[in-house]
Image (cartoon, helix red, strand yellow):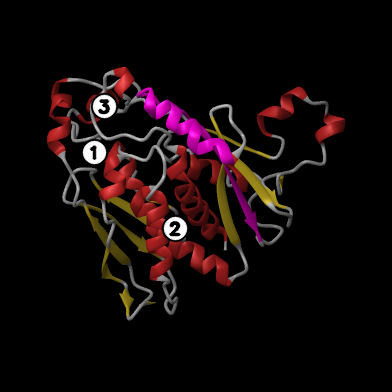
Amino acid sequence: MNVFGEKWTFTSFGESHGAAIGGVLDGVPAGLHIDFDMIREELARRAGKGMVGASQRSQHEPDEVEWLSGVLDGVTLGTPISFIIRNKDARPEDYEWLKHHYRVGHADKVYELKYGIRDWRGGGRASARETAGRVVAGCIAKQELAAKGIHISAALVQVGAETDPAKFADTIAGYQKEGDSIGGIIECRINGLPAGTGEPIFNKLQAELAFAMMSINACKGFEYGTGFAGVTQPGSAINAISGGISGGIADGTEIVFRCIFKPTPSTPKAGVKGRHDACVATRAVPVVEAMTALAIIQFT
């Protein structure tokens, strides 16, 4: 499926090296004033402008949003909002060798097994380029949530084994110099979500958040509250740690969860050509925020 959500539905479309990527966001109420500057800033964060280890393409793509419908003079009309971001720095010729090869650690082979055909130009739909559309839609959701007193913020808290943010850039640069890559952990916090948000069985709040996070490229793990570390602790020591969610329902306190992102499998050291990130987690922070907003907006 290329559609996320039921109350606010976001449809993603486009390929990494096609003419454009984009989306359709339906269910947005009329009268919301869109902060276009915020969207531009979030897209710049996703692109990793000036970040160590960010891919060459991400540095050069302008990521200019063209609004096709649903917005007039910066205000939502209550009709479907559609937009595109043209791929101006696409270089499909860089990937012609993939016509007859599958990259290890990528979705090349399974896409072809599923559809009988695949877009070999940098992975097509499986490329992280697709997440730019999510950031645009998520920004609109974040603005609506902020008006209701609900705020979302995420940050990179670990790169490889390094937990000191002041050393992240040097750590990533070290792997990049070796032609390699490294993974990372992003922590996200939600404040202002009313107690009682969520459902006790199949639509548990943490389940919806995990569903949203695990749809992001390279995300390999989700934890909240005590998380995986809780397995080594006795119940008497961790019973009070909820992460803001109990029984699938928000308890009114700050919600905290973490996502684990794997290292980029395409690296010069692995003999893979192309323009790739040395640490995808650095650019995934605004994507995590965007998908969190799209998940939370379904409950409000």
Q: Can residue 157 be seen by looking at this rendering?
A: no
Q: Where does label 2 land, which residue?
A: 138
Give whichever of discs 3 and 1 has the lower sequence position: 3
- Residue placed under numbered mark 1 in the picture: 124
The residue depicted at 61 percent of the width and 34 percent of the height is 163
Residue 197 seen: yes
- Upstream in the sequence, badge 1 or badge 2? 1
Q: Dot 2, crowdedness within 10 Å: few (<14), some or many (≥20)?
A: many
Please provide percent x and percent y for residue 177. Answer: 38, 27
Nearer to us in this view, 210 or 100: 100
Q: In this view, does 149 lie above or below 10?
A: below
Tag 2: residue type? Gly
* Residue pointed to by mark 3: 108
Residue range corresponding to the magenta coloring: 166-191
Nearest the camera: 126 or 206?
Answer: 126
**In this picture, is 191 found above or below 227?**
below
Q: Seen from this angle, which residue lies furthest right?
A: 236
